[in-house]
Amino acid sequence: MKSGRKQGYLSTWNKGFQAGNNDGLAKGWNAGYRLGRSQGIFAKIGEAAFPLFSYKVLYVTAGIGDPYPALDQAIIDALSKVVTGVFSMSPADSVVAAAELHQPDIVLVLNGVSLSVDRVDELRARGFRTAVWFTDDPYYTEWTVNIAPHYDVVFTLELNCVPFYQSVGCKQVYYLPFAVSPKLYQPTAVEPAMQTDICFIGTAFWNRVRYIDQLTPYLLGKRTFISGLWWDRLKNYRQLSSYIKLGEWMPPEETARYYNGAKMVINLHRPVVDEMNRIGMPIQASSVNPRTFEINGCATLQLVDARSEVAQMYEPDKEIVIFHSPEELRHKLEYYLTHEEERREIALSGYKRTLQQHTYVHRLHQMIAILIQN
């Protein structure tokens, strides 16, 4: 190799090496800073802790596959930190016999779809108080409307479903959103393969398909990751296919790792009008989904579509970022992708608020307080 060409080659290599080294150092510093700050926040706030209620709960799991087993465990763990007695079982078990054995103050059922209402009626006939916590309101009210009246107490994660259940004769109905398990969704380091600019995990409902189709030109130029069912019905699927993990329901543990690896996570709520829903009557959804808390629990910037309850949970532009259209989402993605410090501070503030107010220990403490007082 001639000396001039060699020197040019070495110069180019050195510049590339230096640029790569600087980029790697910056990424390493940012990741380390985020984790260090997160650990400091957790050390200061810690896990939610309350005096135990002298109260016994027989908890009946949802009895459904993913993601319910992880949710059931989060609720059981939280109950153990707020009451003196917790007994759990599946809806396929002998629930009435277990109630007779343990004599709980409440039989709490998650979702309620898998437990026969005849057994709920039998529990009440034997003097046991019952409660159900509906997990998918308002999307399956065609089913839940026939379940709710069999329970003494109804909890729903959708505020607008409270008057709906009251209208069918339920006397005690309370709004109680879901939350996060800090053991499962927490800030952590992940391998480079999981590190992305923009992440979206969830089923391809048609409103989500429309958003992603419109954002395709922008997403193609970024490190984008999309995962879930039915994404092959995108108009631009061929262009985006290399960015998509298709046809799988991602386990919570893996989801948390992808959240941690992303600079930003999009949270686009499920639509009320969709062929997959079973809605008995039109109910406008205003409350947030569980992902709202799970994303923020990983100290990652969350961009969420506008729902009225979002601002009740997190302060917009300080702890979460709200968008109203694909155009606004693209603008905000670009802004926060290029404003590292702002992005990081909002994510950390959202994480702090989550630990302070939005864990399952907070929710179950609130639930038991309601049950005792009413």
Image (spheres, helix red, strand yellow):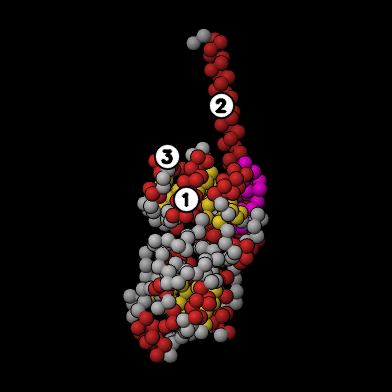
In front: 93, or 277?
277
Q: CA distance from mark 2 to mark 1?
A: 39 Å
Q: Which residues are magenta?
A: 336-351
Tell me the amino acid under the disc marked 2.
Gly
In front: 240, or 345?
240
* Residue wearing tag 3: 239
Residue depicted at x 66% and y 48%: 342
Residues packed near mark 2 inside 10 Å, few (<14), some (14 to 19) or many (20 plus): few
* Nearest to N terminus: mark 2 or mark 1: 2
Element at label 1: helix
Please identify the dominant SS of the magenta region. Answer: helix
Residue 52 point in image, percent of width and height: 57, 78
* Residue wearing tag 2: 16
Which image quarter: residue 310? bottom right
On residue 161, the disc is none
* Nearest to N terminus: mark 3 or mark 2: 2
Element at label 3: helix
Is residue 139 shown to the viewer in this render? yes
| Vertical comparison of 20 with 327: above or below | above
Residue 262 point in image, percent of width and height: 53, 47
* Residue wearing tag 1: 210
Tell me the amino acid under the disc marked 3.
Gln
Is residue 355 shown to the viewer in this render? no
In front: 56, or 349?
349
Q: Label 2 near label 3: C-beta < 8 Å?
A: no
Q: CA distance from mark 3 to mark 2?
A: 29 Å
Q: Label 1 near label 2: C-beta < 8 Å?
A: no
Farthest bottom residue? 126
Q: Nearer the viewer, mark 2 or mark 1?
A: 1
